[in-house]
Image (cartoon, rainbow, N blue to C red):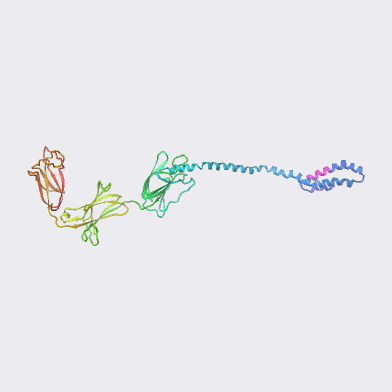
């Protein structure tokens, strides 16, 4: 039996060898001590006395796992440094804490949104901070690269367009800081329906215009964490309608002889050599400011006043003396020969004026009355004396035509005059002060 156990010590696994060595030691002690006593007492019973010793040893083999477990567990104990893996959940819990903080801060976003929506003209809310750059609306314009005060066209750096963007757009912005952050005003030659303003890492402020507008004030990007409007990083403009721009004002003169109605009818010829004056005004009633005098020319009797901005205008036909003598008489306008209109700038304003030839005009007379204005009110009142021998000069344009003295009734007649505009100028006597103008324009009417 000892030999058998020793073989196990030599040839078994490490754990088996340890156990077998231990068992051999126990068996040896049992054989040397109590075993010998058994043999002495029983006499020649060695074989049977030894078997009970071996059998418990064999039966003890199931204890091997119990003995081996400490040996097997030693590597597990050595593996305790793997505890960082066990710490990973702790790291994850730590990582979740910032997420909880971010969640707690999310209500800040709505507060920014509210701050923006209460600003003038803002209709849409601010996009989330995570929003990236938007595409340009079709036919629109994007001012990129931190746009600041200036005028932007299709050739300006950092301007992005789409294939359908009008090439003649012109946008002017003026940026400023009012203490609450950066804002801007704008003007555009194309009406704008929508503007998106982005600043830094913020989202967009959106502005909608109905009807489309060509100007606006106080626009800005969303509010940044500091509580101010963010510095503007880019602006997107979306256009709506056709641009408002300058357009030509054109006069066309025709012979109104097919149907005398002041309207150009088929077959009525165009006339060259007729002068027109263009004036601009603040309203339909003026006041009027001189713009230009242009004369019709060419086969279409056209006078072009060039490109003119939107506004109120007055056109007046100016007949020369020769034309008056020839009986040229306007048939278009109210009064005839004059037209007031509003120039929209969308298309050229083409105004047609007709003329007819009347019979040879009769001559007319011009009478001057000179009186002593006792109450100095500039108007003749009954009983005020008439003044004799006061000199007056008659002129047309720069030419003096006649002169004379008033008679005893304070009258002076310039007769046999062709219809037209004349100027009468008095010669002031020493010691007198004129109450009415010294020179006055008078229109001589045909046959009157």
For residue 86, which quarter of the picture? top right
Q: Main secondary structure of the magenta part?
A: helix
Is residue 22 rendered magenta in the image? yes
Name the one closer to the observer, 71 or 406. Answer: 406
As drawn, the residue found furthest toward the front would be 382
As drawn, the residue found furthest toward the bottom would be 267
Residue 249 visible in rendering: yes
Name the one closer to the observer, 170 or 186. Answer: 186
As drawn, the residue found furthest toward the right would be 43
Residue at the (48%, 43%) spot, across then down = 110
Question: In the rendering, at what x and y percent does residue 26 appear?
Answer: 83, 42
Decide: is 57 above or below 327: above
Give, as a single range, the part of the protein colored magenta. 18-26
Query: Is residue 344 left or right of 70 when viewed as pictured?
Result: left
Question: In the rendering, at what x and y percent does residue 281 appear?
Answer: 27, 47
Name the one closer to the observer, 415 or 85. Answer: 415
Question: In the rendering, at what x and y percent does residue 59 appear?
Answer: 81, 47
Is residue 73 rendered magenta in the image? no
Q: How many marks?
A: 0
Question: In the rendering, at what x and y percent does residue 380 appear?
Answer: 13, 42
Residue 187 visible in rendering: no
Name the one closer to the observer, 105 or 409. Answer: 409
Query: Is residue 16 left or right of 265 when viewed as pictured?
Result: right
Query: Is residue 208 left or right of 290 when viewed as pictured?
Result: right
As drawn, the residue found furthest toward the left would be 408
């Amino acid at each position: 039996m000892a030999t058998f156990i020793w073989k196990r010590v030599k040839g078994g696994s490490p754990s088996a060898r340890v156990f077998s060595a231990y068992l051999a030691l126990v068996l040896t002690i049992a054989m040397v001590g109590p075993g010998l006593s058994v043999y002495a007492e029983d006499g020649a019973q060695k074989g049977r006395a030894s078997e009970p010793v071996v059998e418990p040893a064999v039966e003890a083999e199931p204890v091997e796992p119990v003995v081996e477990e400490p040996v097997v567990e030693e590597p597990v104990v050595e593996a305790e440094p793997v505890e960082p893996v066990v710490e990973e959940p702790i790291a994850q819990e730590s990582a979740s804490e910032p997420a909880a903080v971010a969640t707690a801060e999310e209500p800040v976003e709505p507060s920014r949104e509210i701050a923006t929506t209460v600003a003038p003209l803002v209709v849409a809310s601010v996009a989330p901070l995570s929003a990236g750059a938007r595409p340009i609306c079709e036919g629109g314009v994007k001012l990129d690269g931190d746009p600041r005060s200036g005028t932007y066209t299709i050739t300006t750096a950092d301007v992005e367009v789409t294939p359908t963007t009008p090439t003649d757009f012109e946008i002017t912005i003026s940026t400023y800081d009012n203490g609450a952050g950066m804002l801007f005003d704008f003007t555009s030659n194309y009406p704008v329906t929508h503007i998106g303003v982005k600043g830094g890492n913020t989202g967009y402020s959106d502005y909608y215009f109905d009807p489309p507008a060509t100007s606006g004030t106080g626009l800005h990007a969303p509010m940044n964490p500091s509580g101010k409007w963010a510095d503007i990083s880019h602006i997107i403009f979306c256009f709506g309608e056709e641009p408002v721009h300058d357009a030509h004002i054109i006069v066309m003169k025709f012979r109104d002889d097919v149907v005398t109605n002041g309207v150009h009818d088929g077959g009525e010829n165009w006339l060259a050599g007729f002068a027109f004056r263009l004036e601009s005004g603040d309203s339909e009633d003026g006041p009027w400011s001189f713009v230009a005098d242009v004369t019709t020319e060419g086969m279409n009797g056209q006078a072009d006043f060039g490109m003119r901005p939107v506004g109120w205008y007055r056109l007046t036909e100016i007949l020369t003396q020769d034309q008056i003598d020839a009986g040229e008489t306007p048939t278009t306008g109210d009064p005839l020969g004059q037209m007031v209109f509003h120039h929209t700038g969308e298309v050229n304003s083409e105004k047609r004026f007709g003329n007819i030839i009347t019979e040879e005009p009769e001559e007319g007379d011009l009478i001057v009355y000179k009186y002593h204005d006792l109450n100095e009110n500039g108007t003749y009142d009954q009983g005020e004396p008439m003044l004799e021998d006061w000199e007056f000069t008659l002129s047309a344009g720069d030419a003096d035509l006649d002169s004379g003295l008033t008679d005893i009734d304070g009258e002076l007649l310039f007769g046999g005059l062709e219809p037209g505009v004349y100027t009468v100028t008095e010669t002031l006597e020493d010691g007198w002060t004129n109450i009415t103008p010294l020179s006055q324009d008078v229109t001589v009417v045909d046959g009157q």
